[in-house]
């Protein structure tokens, strides 16, 4: 079987890498990027420091900082206006998953126009699009190395997965120093997001030897370092390890796929405005328990990589241990249930059929080892509400 692989052309990884952003952009022959970020990174001075590195390299950036968490189609309008007014030849996504997803969407819409709905799965978007350079500030989304963006339709509250090489950054600048100020809750949510990426990439029906190696390495690294980063945000070794693992997990799932956790997670984020990593965490143990029977050997490999089992354990024992380990991790990282988070039970119940429909429509559940029916997805939503 031939596997098609896609990675950023340039990857700069390590402490201090962000200081080389200007060199990277200029080296690509680009000179007028739109720097897409958020108000927090403007307020703490990070956006200005990045802008200074660009100007020092002879690059003329324009700042767009009006991104929103879980970007919507409405939130793209002002960004498109800024992109065209600047005559941008590229887009830099600087921040967590939301600024990077926004940057990817603007890069495509700025060239092709239309509506983001036109580009959602199952369409594979080949381009054209402006070049995207990604600079992540969280260790989780992996968006700096993936060929996906996720945008919520403002009219329907559907969180749309939009795939294809058009969304793959041409360059990623991965600097763990940018994550040192992440608070514990964000560290936990983005870290579990990265772990979900790695596990789902490995158990996916689209897994391949290339993605397998990256996924298992990321799982092992996250298993050793996520609790450390959560407990002590100043732990530089843990921050470095988590940043690299998040990028590795991003490359893994971009060249394999995500599966049922992500398919079910997106509607929770869209309808209840739960951060993506947190909604993944709410689902991860239960969805894994539902799925392990269909690929016990693959889940057992994940358990051993995570440190939840040994080679002496049978696959059945190891895969069961993975479920227990995920429950323990979510407990240690104070992951709430939807009920504890404050989501109204009546609203959850009312929207469950629609969320199940939207989860299936995304295509991600079809990659799961155990492919669910709509009814089974509804049962899982009911189970995790607690």
Image (tube, grey):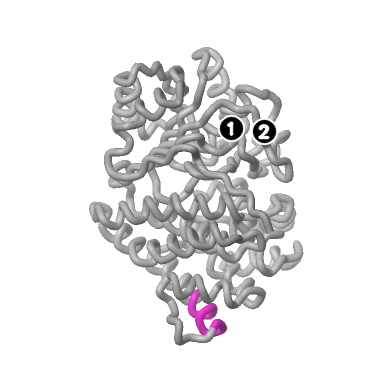
Q: Mark 2, residues whose alpha carbon is within 10 Å: few (<14), some, or many (≥20)?
A: many
Q: Magenta part mainly helix, strand or loop?
A: helix
Point 27% across, 39% down: residue: 16
Mark 1 lies on a secondary structure that is: helix
Relative to residue 286, is residue 341 drawn left or right?
A: left
Disc 2 to disc 1, C-alpha distance = 8 Å
Please state, as top left, top right, bottom left or bottom right, where the C terminus lies in the image.
bottom right
Residue beneath label 2, please? 116
Q: Is residue 27 visible?
A: yes
Relative to residue 357, is residue 65 drawn left or right?
A: left
Q: Mark 1, residues whose alpha carbon is within 10 Å: few (<14), some, or many (≥20)?
A: many
Q: Which mark is residue 105?
A: 1
Q: Are marks 2 and 1 in contact (CB under 8 Å)?
A: yes
Q: Is residue 346 above or below residue 135?
A: below
Point 33% across, 50% down: residue: 183
Q: Is residue 221 above or below residue 79?
A: below
Point 38% across, 52% down: residue: 244
Instruction: Estimate the x, y position of residue 125 in percent, counting from the top left.
Output: 68, 37
Magenta span includes 317: yes
Point 48% across, 86% down: residue: 313
Instruction: Estimate the x, y position of residue 104 in percent, counting from the top left.
Output: 55, 33
- Stretch of the chain drawn in magenta: 315-322
Between residue 106 and residue 40, name the one nearer to us: 106
Mark 2 lies on a secondary structure that is: helix
Magenta span includes 291: no
Instruction: Estimate the x, y position of residue 329 in percent, counting from the top left.
Output: 42, 68
């Amino acid at each position: 079987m031939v596997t098609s692989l896609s990675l950023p052309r340039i990857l700069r990884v390590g402490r201090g890498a962000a200081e080389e952003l200007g060199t990277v952009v200029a080296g690509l022959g680009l000179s007028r990027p739109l720097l897409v970020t958020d108000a927090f990174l403007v307020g703490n001075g990070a956006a200005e420091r990045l802008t200074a590195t660009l100007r020092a390299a002879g690059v003329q950036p324009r700042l767009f900082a009006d991104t929103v968490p879980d970007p919507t189609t409405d939130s793209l309008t002002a960004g498109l206006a800024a992109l065209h007014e600047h005559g941008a030849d590229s887009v830099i996504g600087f921040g967590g998953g939301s600024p990077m997803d926004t940057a990817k969407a603007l890069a495509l819409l700025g060239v092709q126009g239309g509506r983001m709905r036109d580009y959602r799965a199952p369409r594979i978007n080949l381009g054209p699009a402006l070049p995207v350079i990604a600079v992540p500030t969280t260790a989780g989304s992996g968006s700096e190395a993936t060929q996906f963006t996720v945008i919520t339709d403002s009219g329907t509250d559907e969180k749309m997965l939009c795939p294809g090489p058009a969304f793959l950054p041409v360059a990623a600048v991965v600097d763990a120093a940018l994550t040192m100020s992440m608070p514990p809750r964000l560290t936990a949510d983005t870290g579990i997001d990265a772990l979900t990426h790695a596990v789902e990439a490995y158990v996916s029906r689209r897994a391949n030897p290339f993605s397998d190696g990256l996924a298992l390495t990321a799982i092992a690294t996250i298993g050793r370092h996520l609790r450390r980063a959560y407990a002590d945000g100043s732990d530089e070794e843990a921050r470095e390890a988590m940043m690299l693992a998040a990028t590795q997990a991003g490359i893994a799932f971009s060249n394999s796929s995500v599966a049922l956790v992500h398919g079910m997670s997106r509607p929770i984020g869209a309808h209840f405005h739960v951060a993506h990593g947190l909604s993944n965490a709410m689902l991860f143990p239960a969805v894994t328990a539902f799925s392990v029977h269909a690929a016990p050997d693959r889940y057992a490999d994940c358990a051993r990589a995570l440190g939840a089992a040994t080679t002496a354990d049978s696959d059945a024992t190891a895969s069961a241990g993975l479920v227990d380990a995920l429950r323990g991790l979510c407990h240690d990282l104070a992951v709430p249930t939807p009920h504890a988070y404050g989501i109204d039970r009546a609203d959850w119940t009312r929207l469950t059929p629609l969320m199940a429909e939207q989860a299936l429509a995304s295509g991600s559940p079809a990659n799961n080892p155990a492919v669910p029916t709509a009814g089974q997805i509804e049962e899982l939503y009911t189970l995790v509400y607690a």
